[in-house]
Structures are given as C-alpha cells and as structure tokens.
C-alpha cells in the first residue's frame, strides 16, 4: 500500500504574476552576472511568461545558482558554492579558470591600463597614451594567443 498523501504535490501548484515577476528578476540578475547570455535570457523569459506551475519555473533554474524565484511550497535544494573565498597563489579564483597567475595578472593589467591611459592623458596631454592598452593586448596575445582556454 502507498503512504497517505499529506496534500497536493507542491511542484504542481499553479503560479501567478508574483512568481513570474520573481523569476524574471532572478533571470535578470543571472544575465547581469554573465551566467546566461542575451539569447538564453530571451528564451527563458518567454518560458517564464508561459509557465503555469511551480515545476515549470523550477525547471528553468536547475542549472543556475541562487537567486531563484520565490515560489509557493517547500524551497528548492541549495547547492554549496564551489568557489573558494580567498584563493591562494597559483589556485584559480574560479574552478573553470585555467589561466596561469601570469595570465590572470596580464588580464588585470589590461583592464587597468585604460584607466591609467586616461590619467596619463590629462597629465602629459598627448593622445598617444591611449595606445598603451592596445600595446598590452598585442603583447599578451603574442605570448599566449587567443586560444589559451583550450590548452591543457
């Protein structure tokens, strides 16, 4: 015999505009964090507008970390974060980041070079300082190439 049911299956509960808006807010945050691209955001947004049950919305967030939409019923299980809080030297800041410390440093230098060039422009009053980011990009590209992510 089967055990007596304690009520309706929470995943089959109907949702309303509040839950759909919560799902859209969560998707927007994932888009802003770069976890999904604009095309995937559009696809998932369309699915949110067509969702009718809790299960329909939960299916859209199974591969994404928090935030998830606020839904009726018991909360979805929370996955533990795999990203170290304070990475030590030589350990990637993200598990999927296979760059060496030198490559990560070059990326930071390239990002900062735009600000440095702007400050130097006002100090030395020449537009040539805006070639600094381009020079750093050319040098780092020559050292590691554009396919560094594909190397073992």
Image (cartoon, rainbow, N blue to C red):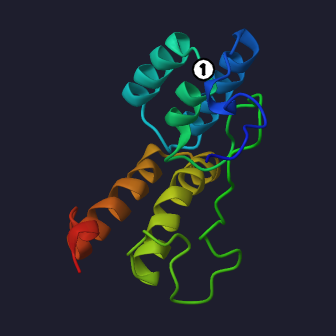
44 or 132, which is in the foreground? 44
Mark 1, Cα crowd under 10 Å, few <14 / some 14-19 / many 20+, is: some
18 or 141, which is in the foreground? 18
On-image quarter of the C terminus: bottom left
- Would you name the residue on which mark 1 appears? 53
As displayed, is residue 80 above or below residue 10? below
Q: Position of residue 136 (x, y in %)?
A: 37, 64
Q: Secondary structure at mark 1?
A: loop
- Give the quarter of the image for residue 149: bottom left
Left or right: 13 as drawn, with respect to 118: right
Q: Position of residue 144 (x, y in %)?
A: 25, 73
As displayed, is residue 56 above or below residue 136? above
- Give the quarter of the image for residue 140: bottom left
76 or 146, which is in the foreground? 76
Left or right: 67 as drawn, with respect to 34: right
Q: How many marks?
A: 1
Look at 46% across and 14% down and name the residue there.
Answer: 46
Look at 27% across and 62% down and name the residue there.
Answer: 138
Left or right: 37 as drawn, with respect to 146: right
């Amino acid at each position: 015999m089967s055990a007596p049911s304690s009520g309706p299956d929470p995943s089959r509960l109907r949702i309303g505009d509040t839950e759909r808006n919560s799902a859209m807010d969560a998707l927007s945050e994932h888009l802003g964090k770069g976890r999904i691209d604009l095309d995937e955001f559009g696809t998932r947004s369309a699915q949110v507008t067509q969702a009718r049950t809790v299960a329909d919305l939960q299916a859209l967030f199974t591969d994404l970390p928090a935030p998830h939409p606020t839904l009726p019923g018991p909360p979805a299980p929370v996955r533990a974060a795999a990203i170290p809080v304070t990475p030590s030297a030589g350990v990637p800041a993200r598990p999927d980041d296979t760059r060496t410390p030198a490559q990560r440093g070059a990326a930071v230098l390239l990002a900062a070079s735009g600000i440095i060039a702007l400050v130097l422009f006002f100090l030395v009053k020449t537009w040539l300082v805006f070639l600094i980011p381009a020079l750093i990009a050319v040098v780092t590209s020559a050292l590691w190439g554009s396919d560094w992510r594909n190397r073992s």
